[in-house]
Amino acid sequence: MSLFPAYGNKTASTTSSDAPESKAVGDDPTTSWLSNTSFQSEIIFLPKVLPSITIDSSDDEITEIVSENNKYPFVREDLDSKQLRQENLSSKKSKKQLKKSKPHHRHHKHKPEYDLDVKNVYFDDKFRDKGNLKVDTLCSRIRPIYNYNLYMKPIGFVGFKWKKPEALKRYYSKSIKVKSKDEKVDRVIKRSKSEVKESDDFNNDKLMKEQNILQLKIKEFNQQLAEEPTNIQLWLQYANLEDNNEFENSHNNSDIERIKYQRKLAIIEKAMELNSNSNELLIAKLKFMSELVPADEYSQQIEALINKDPGNIILWQALITATRSSVAMCTAPRIQSLYLKCFATLHLWSKSNKESYDNRLLNILYQSLIFLRHAGLWEQMWESIRINLNLNLGITSKNIHYSKEPIEEKKLIDMEEVILTSRLPLNQLWLRIELLRENCHWMSVERDKIEFIGDSHRFISPEDIAEYIHPLLTRESNLKLVIYMLLTLKIPLLPLRHNTLKYLDMEDKNWTLDSIEPLAAIFYPCVGEIAGHKQRLLLSTGLFDGRLTSGPQYLRFHPAQEPYLDFIRNAFHIIAENLKSQDKIFINVWWLRFERMLIALQKNESLNNEKKFKKLRGVIKDFLKKEENRNNLHYYREYALIEREMGRLNNSINILKMAIQTKGNISEMIHDDDERTALISLYRTLVEILLDKRITDECNKRDDILKVFSQITPEQSETESLNSAEKFLHNCYQEFIENFNSTPFEESVNKCFLPNFHCDAIVCYIYLLYIIDRPHDEIIQILNKCLEISQENPSLQEQFHENKIIFMQLINDKNNLQKCVNEAMKKYPDNCHVLSVFATIESELPHWSASEQRKNNRLWPIIAMCLAGRARLHSPICLNDPTAMTAALNKLLRFHEKLSVMPDIRTCPLLWRLYMLLLREQNLCEKKGEEIYHASITQCPWARCIYVDAAEIAPQFLTQIQDVIREKDLRMHCTLEELDILRGS
């Protein structure tokens, strides 16, 4: 039915055979609406004719005329589909029309063989012809097959390919870069309400558990303190209850930090009400006050306390530290005046305990000399050392000649001219000349040479050092004085152990490290000569070439390197000659280990190594030819190790064998304790040289070691000798286990430095069991038993920890090695041999590997972690993977940022210098140089080396840096004005 009546099919039809009678338009009611005065033409209705059927015609446009006599529907045969396709697909327009006018249902093509008769309208498909169900196509047997890839692909035709369904990709496999430019990427991580609720519940539960644990600990502390109110260590543990992990605390939140220190201060003040005379509580109180009160107000409070108790050295040290660490108050003359005022109160110190008096005096004297070194006042520092040694050791000026003039001024001027003509940038010119003069000037000159030199700081008058000269009350303190004086000359203790630092009261002197020379105890700890040599040296990559020294240095080639080495050797010899016998051995062994360390660190240099080795060999032979040194086995042991580092392995072994043969068998011939200790140390050293991982001949190695052990007893056959040696060493082990508690324990630096008989004998016993293939568990059980027995002797237990680590390296048991290192670091965190092994393990791990020792906030473990992070950047993991390199670098930078806000660590100049070196190596000076420059100056305003390094990472502030150096009255060898004059001339 049509929408409009004019086009409807309701026209009248007649059944008569006559032609239809015409009617007027107005007479028909269906067409009456067409009648109009303006339209009078006659409309004649004609019978409708069937139009030609095309694809474009719709169902509504097709009109069917059915005759009256025809009772059957009209059946029309469709046109040929191919003909229609050729006619209607001739243009693109016809294609579009084809799609639009496509009927919703198709007329099935009827077979032409059937007559259009009523009987044949319906038929039975008796053959099941499939063609009735689909469009007729050629069957597969006659259908041609085309190779599209062979014929059509060269002309650009690509056939349809069915894509196989791919597996569902995870979220991390999808690239966010594929998104369109107009689409905004929402980087905010959105979580559903259920997820947020679950996360909040989890965090709340975790927080509640932590609070419950903390409340239980507080309750436990309150109960214990109520029972023991005079237990100082218990009060300190209570105050530091929440400081288990310094690295996880938020130092950026000042409010939280302030509340934490207020709580700590309240606990300490409560403890001091019950223990008013405790120095440990006073130190803790001053430490917490320094974090809460501004520097000027804090200094005023300490000065008020000093007026009440002028003889309290703890208050003086706190005042000096507060003034030294303040940017506004720190100047070199002001700090020196505070030290002199402190020395002026010596008459108020109690002299009832002479050893305690000497320890306090040496402690404050050492700190004052270190400050002079940091300020660049080397001449004043050395003159103070020299006169103190002369006074306390009885050295007269006639028989002492430490060194001649280090380098002639004319040669120095010639080298400066070479630098000035190099056309380097201004900051580099200043740095080169400043470092050149700094390395060459450490001894004072006479007054008449000042006019030629032009540097008034080179002349030191007696008035400049008079207040630094003080006598000691006991001769037993002379060795401690010598150690402090040699440490100020940047000579590291070898080996450096935790108990040694504790004995010297240097555990919390973090601000004293400003140069890399003390780190040589980590690179070459002089303990464990079996494995890990290359890994330890890898920790020093880039440090020696990074100019991290201050003042004269001996690690790298320099015009004044040899003069300074000769100066150190003369100082060792002169000091040793004026000490008693046991202390003399200690100083000479220290010197020989120092020479061995230099050979190991300078082995890769190609500059006159043979010449240096020949000179050193001659010096040592002259030393051994002296009557008092000829029969000392300790010296021969160190000389053999020096030969080994020079690459003369056979000479080293022969020296040790000859020394052993001169003394005979240890089991019967030697009865003196010192000689037994020295001889067993020779056996241990010889076995460790043969066990060295660098020696690859395992068969000969085993036979040689068995021959060495067979010399311990005087038996004839080798088998009997080995059995007797095993029995002798086992008896030494049993004697140590059974009689340890009865032997008195004496704490001294010699016990930490020189060999111990029972320790070396047990180590030899372990090596023998290892060579004869005893189970490793049995050997480890022996070491664990020794560790358990020696708990009351910390220095000996520390050595047993070292020996256990050495054995784990020998058998290459990495899992147990890691456990042993962690166990040793928890008890002795400042042991440099343990730290070197820890750093090598950390450097080989990926950057995401967590370490338990990162909770430690002590300086030496933190330095070891910095070295491990630097070595990781040069490891194959990072060199072969840029992503790992970036991650490791970012982690190391973040680690340095954490250190810069830690109260006890941020005042160490060496850590800031390592941070600046990392920026220079990774080309980050433009990005972070200015920030680190200001932060380092804020924390270490007294350290001259910080300003020198800052001129390299922030050269745009060179003028400002020199102005600050002048303001602080620190030593500056060359000014910009002088540099301009030199460049102009």
Image (tube, rainbow, N blue to C red):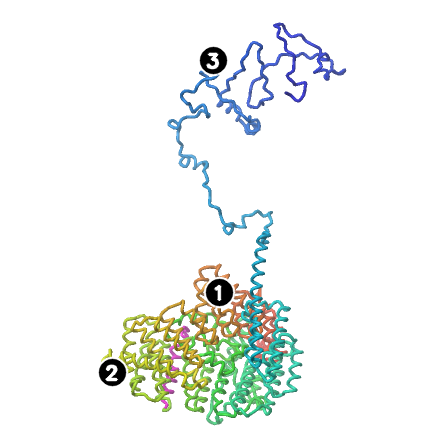
The image quadrant where one finds the N terminus is top right
Mark 3 to mark 1: distance in Å? 93 Å
Numbered disc total: 3
Mark yes or no: residue 601 visible: yes
144 vs 386: above or below: above
Q: Residues within 10 Å of mark 1 (few under 14, many from 20)?
A: few
Q: CA distance from mark 2 to mark 3?
A: 131 Å
Element assignment for label 3: helix
**Circle 3: residue type:** Lys
Query: Does the magenta portion include 615?
Result: yes
Q: Is residue 636 left or right of residue 417?
A: left
Residue 119 numbered tag:
3
Query: Which segment is the magenta one?
Result: 602-626
Look at mark 2 in the image and give the residue it sits on: 715
Quarter of the image holding residue 597? bottom left
Query: Residue 889: where, in percent of width, then height?
Result: 51, 64
Say which of 521 and 857 sits in front.
857
